[in-house]
Image (spheres, rainbow, N blue to C red):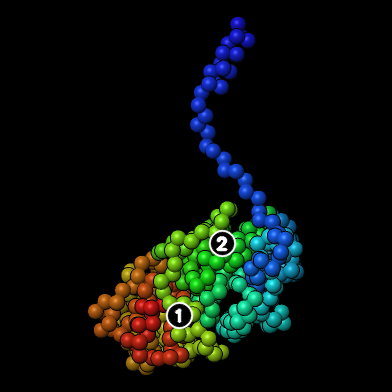
Amino acid sequence: MSRILFSATLALVLALPAFAQEIPTYAPPPTMPADASKLPTIVLMSMGGTIASRGDTRLNITNYGGGMPRVDPEHWVADLPELEGIANIVLDDQRAPRDRPTGTETHEDCARVARRLEELAADPSIDGFVVTHGTNTMSEVAYYMNLTVKTDKPIVFVGSQRPWTGMSGDGPRNLYDAVRVAASPEARGKGVLQSTNQLINAARDVDKTIAYRMNTFVGVDVGALGYADPDKVVFFREPVRRHTTGSEFAGLDLAELPKVEIAYGYRQAPGYLIDAMVEHGVKGIVIDGVGAGSATSGVEGQAEAVKRAQAKGVVVVMTARTHGGRVQDTPRRREAKIVPGDNLLPEKARILLQLALTKTTDVAEVTRIFAEY
């Protein structure tokens, strides 16, 4: 009886319709065509970062670097033979000199890389760029390049949250996808891009939002431009703010920039910090303000210190510490001669203000620049 029951049950199961989710057919990575000259040529440029770091063990994903040898661009290419199927790779190492007393990246480094990108972009045989960078300041460095490099060729910034040697590291996949994005004809003319975790974001909009998780980079207000999906690179929208070939700051000699600092808004934030900035010669101040973008008030508050700074010719820009939504151009701000920072992060507003101050200190003109970029 049990054998008959089993046979009947099996027949019933086989007769039922299948409702299981369909599994997509695996698409193998593209292979090297017979004529490699048909592939786009992509410059792989290193500015260091976690993606260029090693840990002493595969489980070390937070305390890496130190005395470990760093990962050089040729190691990336050797570890990713799949790149041969999508692009001809040219290596260019632009990391800061090893003998510098401190590893902190400087404006001089950024200006040097910007000049190098423009120099290489003038070569008609080069189709695009992938620039690796540390995730801590990648979004602001990418925004600087977005404003200062005069080319419509794709420039894609990429990094990783885990070292190249880490177990289940995100570096290899991020780098592979970034090359795919830079090699995509649709990426041309969209300004500097940032590609991690399969997302493609505009340099202006992207922000690092999580300390260690791999889904850290997002466009808080506006979302991604597109995706580096396994089957193809797809774009759904384009940046509308001025950048690269449309930027009035692109192609300029920017060896030095005016001094601009950032003050944070919070309950009872003192004004003496702003006074100290002015004493140290700042030409502009960005205040990451409370609410929709406001300095704190009071006898010793920020608002009173702002007036003192403005009286000495300092230009003040207001962003919002909410990091979502715009600081708007209201009659009250206009009367107070405060430049609304739109929805820029304070560190990006600082870069734009530095560039603006190379041209003007007129508040109305600086306001125009912030509205267009």
- x then y, percent, for residue 176: 64, 61
Q: Please name the residue shown 43% across and 83% down the image.
A: 353
- How many residues crowd around disc 1 within 10 Å: few (fewer than 14), some, or many (20 or more)? some
Q: Quadrant of residue 197?
A: bottom right
Residue 139 visible in the displayed image: no
Q: Is residue 25 above or below residue 226?
A: above
Residue 154 in percent (x, y) is at 55, 71
Residue 97 appears left or right of 9: right
Q: Which residue is mark 1?
A: 246
Which of marks 2 and 1 precedes in the sequence? 2
Which is more toward the observer, 51 or 371?
371
Residue 37 badge: none
User: Which of the two discs, 1 and 2, sits closer to the camera?
Assistant: 1
Mark 2 sits on what residue? 196
Q: Position of residue 62 (x, y in %)?
A: 64, 61
Front-lying residue, 176 or 260: 176
Query: Which quadrant does the N terminus fall into?
Result: top right
The amino acid sitting under disc 1 is Gly
> Which residue is at a point 63% across and 58% down the rendered structure image?
173
| Mark 2, secondary structure of its residue | strand
Find residue 29 and report its image quarter: bottom right
Above-or-below relation of 48 to 177: below
Secondary element at tag 1: helix
Residue 345 falls left or right of residue 298: right
Residue 26 appears in view:
yes
Mark 1 touches mark 2? (CB < 8 Å)? no
